[in-house]
């Protein structure tokens, strides 16, 4: 039975969403916003509170997170709560897990190979 290569090409639509997600996660302010939202929904002003930046700047960060599918924003009368959208983070976790498993398999094979080489060297080392 042929083994599936865990590092096979990612479908283009997934790759595009991963690019947007990683791009959004690259900024420490956006990661901090996501960390805040892990404890529950929050308003834009609540999310802006720990940062020394303007509301338009925070809104731009939120727009990037929203476009990447990492958060959703609702409208409840005057309140616009932001919520984390965990499905996109699961896509990233699944993608990373795929690579982790592949590298673990490769490193396990390398370890086995090196053990064989060392065993042969020990066996033949006494023949000198």
Image: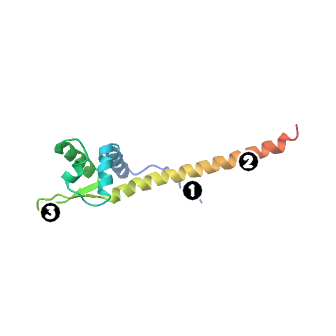
Q: Position of residue 48 (x, y in %)?
A: 22, 48
- Figure coloring: rainbow
Q: Nearer the viewer, mark 1 or mark 3?
A: 3
Callout 1: few (<14), some (14-19), or many (20+) C-alpha neighbours within 10 Å?
few
Q: Position of residue 51 (x, y in %)?
A: 25, 44
The residue to which callout 2 is attached is 116
The residue to which callout 3 is attached is 76
Which quadrant of the structure image shows residue 56? top left
Callout 3: few (<14), some (14-19), or many (20+) C-alpha neighbours within 10 Å?
few
The residue to which callout 1 is attached is 3
Q: Nearer the viewer, mark 3 or mark 2?
A: 3
The earlier-in-sequence mark between 2 and 1 is 1
| 14 or 64: nearer the viewer | 64
Taking the image as drawn, is residue 83 in sight? yes
The earlier-in-sequence mark between 3 and 2 is 3
Q: Of helix, strand and loop, which one carries label 3?
A: loop
Residue situated furthest bottom in the rendering: 76
| Quadrant containing the C terminus in the rendered view | top right
Tell me whether the residue at label 1 lies in contact with that at label 3, contact meaning CB atoms closer than 8 angstroms. Answer: no
Q: Position of residue 36 (x, y in %)?
A: 30, 54
Mark pair 2, 1: CA separation: 23 Å
Q: Is residue 6 left or right of residue 32?
A: right
Q: Residue at x 39, y 51 (%)?
A: 11
């Amino acid at each position: 039975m042929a083994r599936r290569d865990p590092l096979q090409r990612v479908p283009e639509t997934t790759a595009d969403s991963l690019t947007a997600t990683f791009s959004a996660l690259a900024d420490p302010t956006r990661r901090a916003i996501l960390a805040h939202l892990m404890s529950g929904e929050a308003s834009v002003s609540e999310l802006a509170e720990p940062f020394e930046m303007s509301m338009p700047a925070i809104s731009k960060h939120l727009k990037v997170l929203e476009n990447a599918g990492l958060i959703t924003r609702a409208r409840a009368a005057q309140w616009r709560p932001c919520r984390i959208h965990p499905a996109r983070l699961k896509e990233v976790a699944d993608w990373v897990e795929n690579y982790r498993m592949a590298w673990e398999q490769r490193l396990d094979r390398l370890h086995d190979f090196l053990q064989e080489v060392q065993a042969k060297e020990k066996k033949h080392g006494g023949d000198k």
